[in-house]
Image (cartoon, helix red, strand yellow):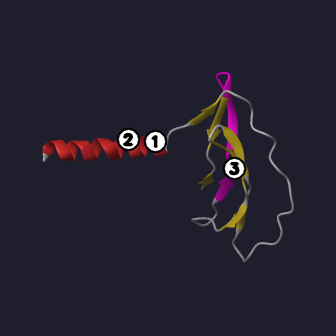
Amino acid sequence: MRKQLAGLLLAGALYVGAANAAVFVTVAPPPPVRVGVVGVAPGPGYVWVGGYHEWVGGRYIWREGRWARPPYAHATWVAPNWAPRHGGYEFVRGYWRR
């Protein structure tokens, strides 16, 4: 029973660690962010969350922007970006800031 519990705890820790793992690319910088027409918000209180390039399967893919409601009042969206680090690029996820 203790071995099973220890195994489950280790698996959970590895899963959480993998979810928070940084993406680091040394092959090439990401392409420029696409620019387009945003349109009208679907309702009051919505904020445009711009698109970004994500590294998937050994290449960059474009994730479309979308309208989103902030999770709390006066929240500001900080866009994701690719930061130059140690001869490559690290993906910094977007987040809501108070």
Q: Is residue 29 magenta?
A: no
Picture quadrant of residue 92: top right
Q: Mark 3, residues whose alpha carbon is within 10 Å: few (<14), some, or many (≥20)?
A: some
Q: Secondary structure at mark 2?
A: helix
**Residue shown at 67% from the left, 57% from the top:** 76
Pick whichever of labels 1 and 3 is earlier in the sequence: 1
Residue extending furthest toward the bottom: 43
Q: Position of residue 39 (x, y in %)?
A: 83, 69
> Which residue is tagged 2?
14
Q: Which residue is mark 1?
A: 18
Q: Amino acid at mark 3?
A: Ala
Instruction: Report the span colored magenta.
Output: 76-88
Q: Amino acid at mark 1?
A: Ala
Q: In the figure, is residue 8 to the left or right of 33?
A: left
The residue that mark 3 highlights is: 79
Disc 2 or 3, which lies upstream in sequence? 2
CB-based contact (under 8 Å), mark 1 and mark 2: yes
Q: Name the amino acid, label 2.
A: Leu
Q: Residue at x 43, y 41 (%)?
A: 17
Distance of mark 2 from mark 3, alpha carbons? 27 Å
**SS type, badge 3:** loop
